[in-house]
Amino acid sequence: MQKKLLSLFAVIFLASFCSVYAGPWEDMAQLAQSIKQTSFPDKSFNVVKYGASEKNPSIKNTKAINAAIVACNKKGGGKVIVPKGVYVTGPITLLSNVNLCIEEGAELRFTTNYAEYLPTVLTRWEGLDCYNYHPLIYAFKATNIAITGKGIINGQGSNTAWWNWNGNKLFGYKDGEPSQKTTGRAALMKMSEENVPVEKRQMGEGNYLRAQLINFVQCNTAKIEGVTLQNSPFWVIHPLLTNDLTVRNVTIESLGPNSDGCDPESCKNVLIEGCTFDDGDDCIAIKSGRNNDGRRWNIPSENIIVRNCKMKAGHGGVVVGSEISGGYKNLYVENCEMDSPELDRIIRIKSNTCRGGVVENVFARNVKVGQCKEAVLKIDLQYEPNEPCKRGYVPVVRNVNLENVTCQQSNYGVSIDGLEDANCVNNINLKNCDFRGVKYNSNDIKGAVNVNFENVRINNTIISSKKISTVFSPLTK
């Protein structure tokens, strides 16, 4: 009798548990509801009343737009309106309780007079802490901020020195010209490796490290909605150490070097939905600092939702890394469409033994892919193998799950380049996936364990879970 009661209690407990916890997608739904949303007083501040004009040079419009923001902030917040017209401006600083509204037919066109983006401000550049050129739109330790409207924010990176500074001839660079490759990038990496105090890492004039289009640093409760973002000098949207962020119905058109679409870095509780990405680099790249700087802060990115988005060109659709030293957990990707001959990968995770980091709990479902170049799922722990840094920080990737993902053309279905310790890549699961037009008719998996396939087809052939190859790159030995 006692055994029967215990069995009954066990059944009731399990039934109760299962009814309460519906899995990761229920977690995602609860997360989406919990993300704090912006709210502003019903007050408006038109930049024209503060001196902004289509006829004004950038310096005058810069002062006028920032003056409207300051006035809005001092009066308790509200909406700063940029009305129809083209306004050339320099850097803008967003303050708490301000909604910068770019109305339909309006364009903020940022100057290419680089001196106007000085003095430098505190930011990160490719995961490294520094003082650099003022981002085109910047916020520091602000709360309840937004950029909204149906207008255009044009960074004018195209065919200017911003893109030339990358050092790539595809973007106008000529031999003998200065670039980030020969100056600031290497210098900043060296400072990080040597733990030089951040206040001494002044990377402005003469270092050629390009500015972000939008950079929110240590902010809370933020929104970017409806706007079109074009031709960023560098990363397009870069939230850093910022929590409770919504990016909704944004169109990104920036095919320049390192034109990542949206890069949440050491951010928590982020919703990216209804956006369209057409980028020169990763469409979405989740980060948490690079090498010593990432480990010093030790703040992971976590709880990020990507849904109902469209990805066109880019190195990756939704990416974790490569500056991921602080780690990452809990990514949800659903109901996205990705398709371009210039899109390299769909879900990508990248790190190396300089950066380390633990990446876990990645969930993707109902993703429809036309074509991509390399692979639907790419895990690369051999990224940038020649990076000059102290090694020995072993990255870990675990609990990655793809369900109902289809693709019409790629080189591979799954490509994994792990480390000699195969346990670094563990528990990779694909279910009900259909990959057609796979050039090499296979997966390419090295250095991983517990890679499981359930009803996965490659070129209409069911792929079973097989023992994973243990062929490793010499770089890991």
Image (tube, rainbow, N blue to C red):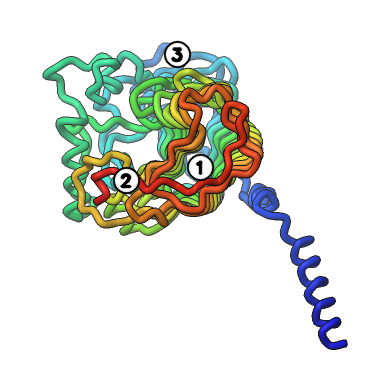
* Mark 2 or 1, nearer chain start: 1
On the question of residue 116 being in view, the answer is: yes
Please state which amino acid type lies under the numbered disc 3.
Answer: Glu
x and y percentages locating residue 137 in the rendered image:
42, 33
Residue 199 falls left or right of residue 328: left
Q: Nearer the viewer, mark 3 or mark 2?
A: 2
Quadrant, the N terminus: bottom right
Q: Which mark is residue 54?
A: 3
Q: Residue at x 37, y 33 (%)?
A: 212
- Identify residue for label 1: 73
Residue sitting farthest toward the bottom? 2
| Residue 316 in the image: above or below residue 360 | above
Q: Which mark is residue 472?
A: 2
Secondary structure, mark 2, is: loop
Residue 127 falls left or right of residue 319: left
Q: Residue at x 45, y 13 (%)?
A: 54
Secondary structure, mark 1, is: helix
